[in-house]
Image (cartoon, helix red, strand yellow):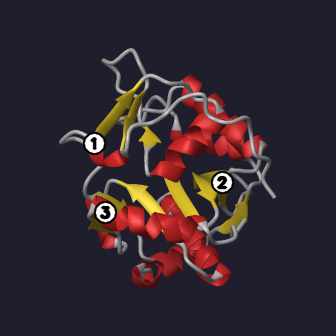
Amino acid sequence: MPTEPSPCAWQFPPPETAGEQGLVALGADLEPGTLLAAYRSGIFPMPLADVGDMTWFSPDPRGIVPLAEFRSSRSLRRSARRFSVTADRCFAAVIAGCADPRRPGGWITPAIRAAYERLHALGWAHSIEVWDEAGTLAGGLYSVEIGGLFAAESKFHVRTDASKVALAALVERLRDAGGARLLDVQWTTPHLLALGARDVARADYLRRLRGALAAPPAF
């Protein structure tokens, strides 16, 4: 079981007070207790390059992947045969891959990396690793898990389809765990929509979140 850290020293505004772009708060810190309090409230950090303080979001609509609606294409299933998948084998390498500065739109700062590595050490953050035939890390994803909430933070690949294989493996694991599961992807993209993600209203997300938090973890 994960270790509960010291309580959050801050009080987040209600997520319903977020602005048009989903921004709900500025400041606070990235201590484990702060991050967990945010996720439990439906809020997550996303640093902006031109803002000195940490920025916290609760977008409306919110992107989720309903587990029953995830679409694994025939080509993805063929790709999956070329890889092997593990969990929590090398969290630091996965978040480093996600934080590669050569990736467009990168937002994972050294402070973010350190914060989620602390969460992982406490048992609250997890990684899915995808390996190629040579045993090289080909892609993966990392997420925060609180009860039945699985907040997917970022994924990466250096081999075609490796990040999709990671997501498919995560969905399978969450399905197998049963119970109320909420796979949160924050914002949808065309890539995620093609895999079965969809947007839900913030109020619907918060309702689902309350149910998911009461479920036992899958990891």
Residue at the top extreme? 52
Q: Which residue is mark 3?
A: 203
Q: What distance separates the C-alpha of mark 1 from that of mark 2?
A: 32 Å
Residue sitting at 27 percent across and 41 percent down?
Answer: 18
Q: Which residue is mark 1?
A: 17
Judge from the rendering whether residue 160 lies leftward or rightward of residue 192; answer left or right.
right
Which of the labelled discs sits on residue 65, or is there none? Answer: none
Name the kind of residue labelled 3 in the image. Answer: Ala
Residue sitting at 32 percent across and 53 percent down?
Answer: 187
Crowding at dot 2, Cα within 10 Å, few <14 / some 14-19 / many 20+, comes out as many
* Nearer to us in this view, 33 or 74: 33
65 versus 14 height, above or below? below
- Disc 3, SS: helix
Please identify the quadrant where the C terminus is shown. bottom right
Q: Closer to the N terminus: mark 1 or mark 2?
A: 1
Name the kind of residue labelled 2 in the image. Answer: Ser
- Disc 1, SS: helix
Please identify the quadrant where the N terminus is shown. bottom right
Q: Which residue is mark 2?
A: 127
Name the kind of residue labelled 1 in the image. Answer: Thr
* Nearer to us in this view, 133 or 202: 202
208 versus 18 height, above or below? below
Q: What distance separates the C-alpha of mark 2 from that of mark 3?
A: 28 Å
Q: Nearer the viewer, mark 2 or mark 3?
A: 3
Q: Nearer the viewer, mark 1 or mark 2?
A: 1
In which image quadrant can residue 49 be found?
top left
Judge from the rendering whether residue 157 lies leftward or rightward of residue 73; answer left or right.
right
Q: Closer to the N terminus: mark 1 or mark 3?
A: 1
Residue 29: x %, y % from top left = 55, 25
Residue sitting at 43 percent across and 31 percent down?
Answer: 102
Residue 109: x %, y % from top left = 51, 26
Q: Closer to the N terminus: mark 2 or mark 3?
A: 2
